[in-house]
Image (spheres, rainbow, N blue to C red):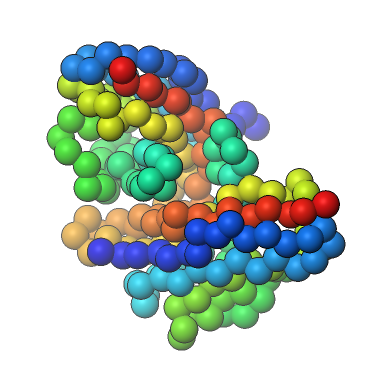
């Protein structure tokens, strides 16, 4: 069974600091990786996708991927109270039985940004 | 472009009843996935449909079923409801799925309470 692991938190950081969220996955051949943000009572919204090793930056967000270590991270610079949410890591992997691709989600890390 | 639309947004059912949830994907998206989200288990994959065919299925009992219509709209049904079925049911759509094209976009979800 393909697994995606995240530290459940809560992770508390002061406003303006860098928040670092981590994710590991079990399927070595996974090819695409996503970060979603979910506010309480709302549905997940896509923040970042990353497919190649290295860093990908989008505004205050940077996704980092290391396929050799099976590790994905999300850095949030200049954290704001509005960033307080649960962050979900998702990994796309091939279901060998079905021959199709499926996203598996971690259980999420709850981030609190303290003003 | 309109997002993923789910109906109904909130519903309360009694144990033993059945429920049908509806999802209209983003225009042009042919893949529709369904997820169940609970506080304890996180986001769990139910099934995925593509071109009216179930392409992938998660580890849920047969009481959970779904279908997709020719216009890509999808429905999921849960029969003989149990208290443990109380959850947020999320529909997500993507253009086609696949190894690096499986970015999914979620609807607002249907909150089901079983009493």
The answer to whether any part of residue A57 appears in the image is: yes
Quick one: B40 or B28, which is closer to the camera? B40
Q: Is residue B73 above or below residue B98?
A: above
Residue A25 falls left or right of residue B16: right
Residue B45: percent from left, percent from top: 34, 46
| Quadrant of the frame with the N terminus of chain B | top right
Residue B7: percent from left, percent from top: 46, 19
Q: Quadrant of residue B74?
A: top left
**Residue name at image x 45 percent, y 78 percent:** A70
Quick one: B62 or A76, which is closer to the camera? A76
**Residue name at image x 22 percent, y 55 percent:** A98
Q: Which residue, as the protein is rendered here, is positioned at the far bottom?
A: A68
| Quadrant of the frame with the C terminus of chain B | top left
> How many badges with numbers are in the image?
0
The answer to whether any part of residue A51 appears in the image is: no
**Residue name at image x 28 percent, y 32 percent:** B84
**Residue name at image x 45 percent, y 26 percent:** B110
Residue B49: percent from left, percent from top: 32, 40
Residue A9: percent from left, percent from top: 55, 59
Q: Quadrant of residue A61?
A: bottom right
Q: Is residue A113 above or below residue B77?
A: below
Quick one: A111 or A50, which is closer to the camera? A111
Residue B79 falls left or right of residue B26: left
Residue A83 falls left or right of residue B108: right
Q: Quadrant of residue A96?
A: bottom left
Q: Is residue A68 above or below residue A43?
A: below
């Amino acid at each position: 069974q393909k697994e995606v692991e995240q530290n459940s938190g809560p992770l508390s950081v002061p406003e303006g600091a860098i928040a670092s969220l981590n994710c590991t996955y079990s399927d070595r051949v996974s090819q695409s990786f996503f970060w979603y943000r979910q506010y309480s009572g709302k549905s997940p919204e896509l923040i970042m996708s990353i497919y190649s090793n290295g860093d990908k930056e989008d505004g205050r967000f940077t996704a980092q991927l290391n396929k050799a270590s099976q590790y994905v991270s999300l850095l949030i610079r200049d954290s704001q109270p509005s960033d307080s949410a649960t962050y979900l890591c998702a990994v796309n992997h091939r279901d060998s039985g079905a021959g199709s691709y499926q996203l598996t989600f971690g259980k999420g890390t709850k981030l609190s940004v303290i003003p | 472009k309109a997002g993923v639309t789910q109906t109904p947004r909130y519903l309360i059912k009694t144990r033993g009843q059945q429920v049908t949830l509806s999802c209209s994907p983003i225009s042009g998206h042919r893949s529709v996935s369904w997820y169940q989200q609970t506080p304890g288990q996180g986001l769990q994959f139910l099934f995925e449909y593509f071109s009216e065919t179930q392409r992938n299925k998660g580890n849920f009992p047969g009481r959970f079923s779904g279908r997709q219509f020719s216009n890509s709209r999808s429905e999921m049904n849960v029969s003989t409801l149990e208290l443990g079925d109380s959850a947020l049911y999320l529909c997500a759509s993507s253009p086609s799925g696949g190894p690096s094209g499986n970015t999914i976009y979620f609807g607002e979800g249907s909150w089901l309470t079983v009493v």
